[in-house]
Image (cartoon, rainbow, N blue to C red):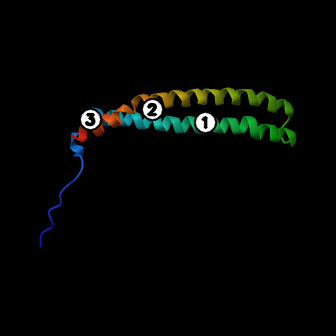
Amino acid sequence: MSAPNTVMTGPDPAFITSADWAAISNLLSTLWQILGSALGFGGSMLLAHGMIPSLVSSRDIPAELGRKVRLPLYITGAAFLAMGLLSAYQFADRLGVITGIYYRGAQ
């Protein structure tokens, strides 16, 4: 008994060139950058705006140390926010590769 002849429907993935795969790789790397910057921003803001004041009010750390630590954490959070916004812009700019592959493959 032989296997039934299957007919492939939809676009053939063989038309995607190595340049397209490189563009997809760049697109995915910006997604990882967005994730990393979001985690960095969230973590630094959580520490600076949530945990440090709580630790100071409960007197687990001295108030002077709390004041010294918060400013660098806010600056770090601002840097992660800027990196996230830049990565989101790059992602939107590189997103055209998907539509190019889709419309070229639909022919």
- Residue appearing at x 78%, y 27% in the figure: 68
Separation (CA) of disc 1 from disc 3: 33 Å
Q: Quadrant of the C terminus?
A: top left
**Amino acid marked by disc 3:** Ser
Secondary structure under badge 2?
A: helix
Check residue 18 in the rendering and tell me which mark sits there, or answer none.
3
Between label 3 and label 2, give the one nearer the viewer. 2
Q: Is residue 105 above or below residue 72?
A: below
Name the residue: 12% across, 69% down.
2
First in sequence: mark 2 or mark 1? 1
Residue that mark 2 sits on:
91
Q: Earlier in the sequence, mark 3 or mark 2?
A: 3
| Separation (CA) of disc 3 from disc 2 | 19 Å
Name which of mark 1 and mark 3 comes first in the sequence: 3
Looking at the image, residue 70 sits to the left or right of residue 44; the answer is right
Mark 3, residues whose alpha carbon is within 10 Å: few (<14), some, or many (≥20)? few
Q: Amino acid at mark 2?
A: Phe
| Residue ID for mark 1 | 40
